[in-house]
Image: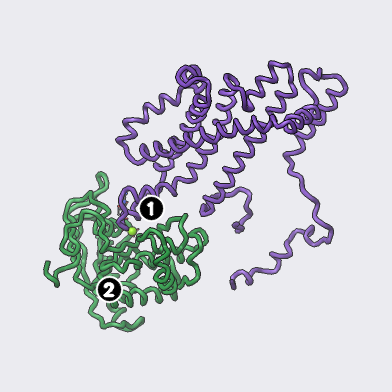
Amino acid sequence: MQHFTARPLTHELGEDPAAWTTEPQRVSVPVGVWFPLAVVLLLEAAVRAGWIPAHLLPAPTTVLSTLYDLAASGALWQHVAASGTRIATGFAIGAVAGVVLGLATGLRRSLEAAFDPTFQALRAIPSLAWVPLLLLWLGIDEAPKIVLIAIGALFPVYLSVQSGVRNVDRKLVELAQAFGLGQPAIAWRVLLPASLPSLFTGLRQALSLSWMFLVAAELIAATRGIGYLLTDGRETGRADVVLAAIVVLAVLGKLSDGVLKFVEARALRWRDAFDPGAGSGQRT
Amino acid sequence: MSPVGPVIEATIRGKSYGARAVLENFKLTVAPGEIVALLGPSGCGKSTALRIVAGLDRDFDGEVRVLGQRVREPSSAVGVMFQEPRLLPWLSVARNVAFAVDGVEGAMPRVEALLEEVGLAGWGNALPRALSGGMEQRVALARALFREPAILLLDEPFGAVDALTRARLQSLLLRVTARHGTTVVLVTHDTREAVLLADRVVVMSAEAARRSVEIPVPLPRPRERLGAEPTVLETRLLDALGIAHTD
Ligand SMILES: Nc1ncnc2c1ncn2[C@@H]1O[C@H](COP(=O)(O)OP(=O)(O)OP(=O)(O)O)[C@@H](O)[C@H]1O
Ligand SMILES: [Mg+2]
């Protein structure tokens, strides 16, 4: 389009003299990598030198080789699959319930008055307090773990959807009314999309809580899963297994959050929000 | 309802926000196919009156009839364009224009024709965040015209565009309304625009209790942009506004 060709040439060449050199650009390593890298190297050296007892804090290379063995034997994948299934099921149930309840109480003051105090009270219960009850009611199978994760995921989603709906611009709702949309159409076509940014914030909080509750559930009663791996490592005195499980949890947590972040970025592409990284006049 | 009866009969005895009276004894009667301009100082209640006629505000003392029916909720016979564009930021320009129907697919030819008419051909897939203020306003105009409503309520529809675009949009509005015999109530701050477009101008005063003044515009169409008569009428409008200001 013509207004793009009208850009001044300096834009391509740039004011930065470095852009004029013919040398290839150096591969840039994020600055955030240096600190943990230094810590890991230091640890390795300290353990090898015998300053730290290896049975308490094994060297990073030992943890890596334990991880490798776990993966090679196939045990790691069984644990990951077990935990992943629990997370996915519990998170999905909790999130859907949170969206439905958040929408209902967000849309109707009467429903909010009737149910919100109860939810707030339930939310105040530390979720681990549910564990004994869930075990009593549901046995030690998958059900109590999934329900616990769902409880954890429910409240952040519920709160974010409710406040998202309440913060929608009144003028957009009025526009929809002017076009003759009824209540359900307004909820679906205006309130829900407008509260998507808030919903995603809640979903990401819910996901990290889900991981927390997963580990809690698996620590207490499980024969498979990464939480079980943690318990098993402790009982057999294998600090390397415990650390390997922690590394797996970190990777999985980061990975699942990354997926959600990706979906969020795609779903909210329409947003025209403040981006501290963007330079003046540059939009992506 | 007789066929020649008024399309809009609004009697607003009182409208207030909290303790503040905004409108008092405001009457507006509009005949079929008539174009009425509402003129008045900022904050005098023009947008409020328009929202009441549109059925969006029922918290007032009085009665509004549109096409002989008492207004209780927004009617599909009425197209509204608000003072702000109010585009839905998550919908493409085309989907915003076709907001009256859910899903743009069948409506695409009509949407494209409208976008072309408001000078935005090819912008259908853009998101509102990529538009300038004037472009947003034109999308909002296209959206108001989309359903070809019998009645159009326009709140400062051309406030954010340049003089040339404004002239083009004004003639677009006159063309569309003449073609369909549309009845129009148009809020404007521009006396020139009022004289060019309206059959009648209602000049509202800053104080709620004062009567509004009605000034007919008996000029033939198409109207000259800079004739002698429009300037005389404009002077009368400015006088009316001035009288409304002082005292
Ligand atoms: N939601 C509201 N709550 C309280 N007061 C309001 C509200 N909306 C409008 N008002 C008041 O009502 C008066 C009339 O507002 P309105 O928007 O109708 O003015 P207007 O004539 O359209 O002005 P402008 O030309 O600036 O758009 C104003 O004084 C404003 O302060
Ligand atoms: Mg206004």
Q: Residues within 10 Å of mark 2 (few under 14, many from 20)?
A: many
Q: Where is mark 2, residue-wise?
A: B198
- Coordinates of residue A258 in the picture (x, y in percent): 61, 42
| Residue type at the position of mark 2 | Ala
* Residue A88 vertical position relative to residue B132 in the rendered view, above or below: above
Residue at disc 1, secondary structure:
helix
Q: Is residue B92 left or right of residue B98?
A: right
What residue lies at 41% left-to-right and 24% top-to-bottom? A121
Residue at disc 2, secondary structure:
loop
Q: Is residue A67 left or right of residue A254?
A: right
Picture disc at residue A172: 1
Which chain is in green here?
B
| Residue type at the position of mark 1 | Leu
* Residue A67 vertical position relative to residue B79 in the rendered view, above or below: above
Foreground residue, B25 or A162?
A: A162
Q: Residue furthest right?
A: A49
What residue lies at 51% left-to-right and 42% top-to-bottom? A200
Picture disc at residue B140: none
Splitting the image into 4 quarters, where does residue B35 fall? Answer: bottom left
